Amino acid sequence: MFTNSPFDVCASLSANTYLPGTLGTGGVVIVDTGDAFLDRLGLTGVALIKIDVEGLELSVLKGLRETVDRERPYLIFEILVYAHLAQRAGNEAQKKHVMERRKEAALGLERFCREQDYVVYRMLSNGDLEYRRELDPGDSTDLMAMDHLALPREKAADLLAGYGYRIDMRPDQAAA
């Protein structure tokens, strides 16, 4: 575990999420897959999965693949921006490495959602949802627009219409 304190909201299990020296080293963490954990508890009917694990969202979703296939829950996850790191002082090679890892994480989430036939929206600070065909944040430095909502394509239009969201592109028209 890489952390600065027992209550560090940016702690991560990945050394590649932040620039070296940003986080100290913490203790040992026992990790299990979500599918195994839910099976042990006998939980079914999962409707929503919220993930915020500082760059390891794809790993979590891979560990929940059976649950996602079977239950088709709504997913909320964070995609870490990285463009702002280029402006920070520090070793250029290390910054480039972290930026590449963050981009790979975003592209991995994009592939997962596409393979599972999920439609993804960025959750904006004003409450709006912005359809996202591509999940790489690119040049974005907006630390307030990192949360995303992924909906199974077969449920998306009805859910969003029911809550009065204006949809830029209807999920059934979006290219898979």
Image: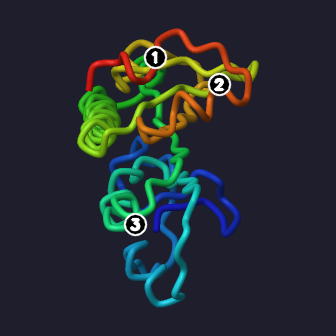
* Residue 41: mark in rendering: none
- The residue located at (41%, 51%) in the rendering is 57
Q: Whole-Å distance between the Cαs marked 3 and 2?
A: 26 Å
Q: Quadrant of residue 174?
A: top left
Q: Are marks 2 and 1 in contact (CB under 8 Å)?
A: no
Across and down, in percent, residue 70 comes to: 37, 64
Give the structural element (helix, strand or loop) at label 3: helix
Mark 1 or 3 closer to N-term?
3
Disc 1 crowd, CA 10 A, few/some/many (<14, 14-19, 20+): few
- In this figure, which residue is indicated by the disc labeled 2? 161
Mark 3 or 2 closer to N-term?
3
Instruction: Determine whether 166 is above or below 156 in the image.
Output: above
Disc 2 crowd, CA 10 A, few/some/many (<14, 14-19, 20+): few
- In this figure, which residue is indicated by the disc labeled 1? 87
Amino acid type at mark 1: Gln
Amino acid type at mark 2: Ala
Q: Nearer the viewer, mark 1 or mark 3?
A: 3
Mark 2 or 1 closer to N-term?
1
Instruction: Determine whether 77 is above or below 12 in the image.
Output: above
| Residue sitting nearer the eye, 138 or 154 | 154
Q: Coloring scheme of the render?
A: rainbow
Q: How many marks?
A: 3
Q: Quadrant of residue 134?
A: top left
| Residue sitting nearer the eye, 159 or 103 | 159
- In this figure, which residue is indicated by the disc labeled 3? 67
Disc 3 crowd, CA 10 A, few/some/many (<14, 14-19, 20+): many
Q: Nearer the viewer, mark 2 or mark 1?
A: 2
Across and down, in percent, residue 153 comes to: 41, 35
Across and down, in percent, residue 162 comes to: 70, 30
